[in-house]
Amino acid sequence: MGNTLVNSQLQDVKAFLSNVIVSFGNFLDETSLSQFQLENEEERSYTKVIFAQLRKLVVYSEEGLDACSIILQSEPFQKAAAEKTLYKIYHQCIEEFFAPKNDAWYEDSRSAYTGRNSIKFYRAIPESVSQLVKSLEGEFQRIREELEYYETDYRTKMMQSK
């Protein structure tokens, strides 16, 4: 891929990550578990898992944003570093959103074909949490489609170097 295209994707991802940080960050700053009418300890524990995942996504997004900023400021543009960063963002941010390691939620891949939201929660959660995730899912999906190339390209390069 040319420098211009990679640079453009890096700028797009940087804007996306900024939006994720603001959206999740504002929600987490303004929301606490005590605000919800959680009926039992099971609901409370599950909601804590959701909040932990959102915090993790903010941290990963901040790391990705910092990396994007550094690469975009460097002269000359470092294409290899940019591609490696996009690969890392794909795994740490995008894949972690769709398939969190802590099983906070899961992706119903069949939903993508119907045009519905694909993120499903294992239990009932507060509506504000559900709406937050749904509001960003489309952008996560868009960025995932843009960055899937780096997943395949990186694996191909690793196989060829062996």
Image: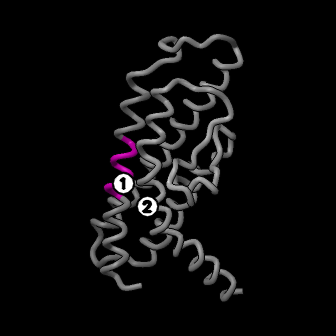
Residue at image x 52%, y 50%?
116
Question: Which portion, as a residue range, is magenta?
Answer: 14-21
In which quadrant will I find the N terminus?
A: bottom left
Query: Is mark 2 in CB contact (under 8 Å) with mark 1?
Result: no
Disc 1 is placed on an element classified as: helix
> In the image, is residue 45 above or below residue 156?
above
Residue at image x 47%, y 42%?
134
> In the image, is residue 104 above or below residue 124?
below
Residue at image x 59%, y 53%?
111
Foreground: 70 or 14? 14
Residue at the front extreme of this rendering: 114
- Classified by dominant secondary structure, the portion drawn in magenta counts as helix
Amino acid beneath label 1: Phe
User: Label 1 neighbourhood size at 10 Å, few (<14), some (14-19), many (20+)?
Assistant: some
Mark 2 or 1 closer to N-term?
A: 1
What percent of the width, then of the height, locates residue 80? 45, 78
CA gap, disc 2 and disc 1: 10 Å
Q: How has the structure been colored for display?
A: one colour
Amino acid beneath label 2: Arg
Residue 16's label in the rendered image is: 1
Q: Is residue 153 left or right of residue 19?
A: right
Residue 142's label in the rendered image is: 2
In which quadrant will I find the C terminus?
A: bottom right
* 91 drawn magenta: no
User: Label 2 neighbourhood size at 10 Å, few (<14), some (14-19), many (20+)?
Assistant: few
